[in-house]
Image: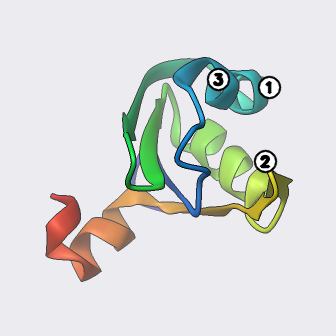
Amino acid sequence: MESHKVYIGNLSHSVTEEEIKDIYEEFGDIKSIHLNAGEGFGFIEYGTIEEAESAIHGTHGKEFFGRTLKAEDARQVMHHAPRYR
């Protein structure tokens, strides 16, 4: 893991920042949340790499609003997919 930022994908297009915060704040101090409305993905920035890793391990593959969450290190996603930069 290289980053404090977590990519979250396969989100319901109607999910709100508050709903994301409700499930992700248990993993640590959230510095920022950025959702791409209508795109089904977003980014969460934590204070430490350990918190980000915990969030990834704690939510990847979990069901949320009827969808299976995809959680990854944001740097890996941004490196492989230029449209997320």
Report which residue position mark 3 lands on.
21
Report which residue position mark 1 lands on.
26
Q: Earlier in the sequence, mark 3 or mark 2?
A: 3
Label at residue 65: 2
- In this rendering, the answer to whether 45 lies above or below 38 is above
The answer to whether residue 4 is visible is: no
Residue type, numbered disc 2? Phe
Q: Marks 2 and 1: in contact by CB < 8 Å? A: no
Label at residue 16: none
Q: Is residue 47 left or right of residue 10?
A: left
User: Is disc 2 surrounded by few (<14), some (14 to 19) or many (20+) residues within 10 Å?
Assistant: few
Q: Residue at x 77, y 53 (%)?
A: 59
Q: Quadrant of residue 26?
A: top right
Q: Marks 2 and 3: in contact by CB < 8 Å? A: no
Residue 6: percent from left, percent from top: 49, 49
Q: Is residue 3 left or right of residue 65?
A: left
User: Is disc 1 surrounded by few (<14), some (14 to 19) or many (20+) residues within 10 Å?
Assistant: few
Q: Residue at x 77, y 31 (%)?
A: 23
Secondary structure under tag 2 reads: loop
Q: Nearer the viewer, residue 60 or 41?
A: 41
Q: Nearer the viewer, mark 1 or mark 2?
A: 2
Secondary structure under tag 1 reads: helix
- In this rendering, the answer to whether 79 lies above or below 53 is below
Secondary structure under tag 3 reads: helix
User: Is disc 3 surrounded by few (<14), some (14 to 19) or many (20+) residues within 10 Å?
Assistant: some
Cα–Cα span, label 1 and label 2 = 18 Å
- In this rendering, the answer to whether 31 lies above or below 70 is above
Residue 45: percent from left, percent from top: 44, 33
Cα–Cα span, label 3 and label 2 = 14 Å
Q: Residue furthest bottom?
A: 80
Q: Residue at x 75, y 62 (%)?
A: 67
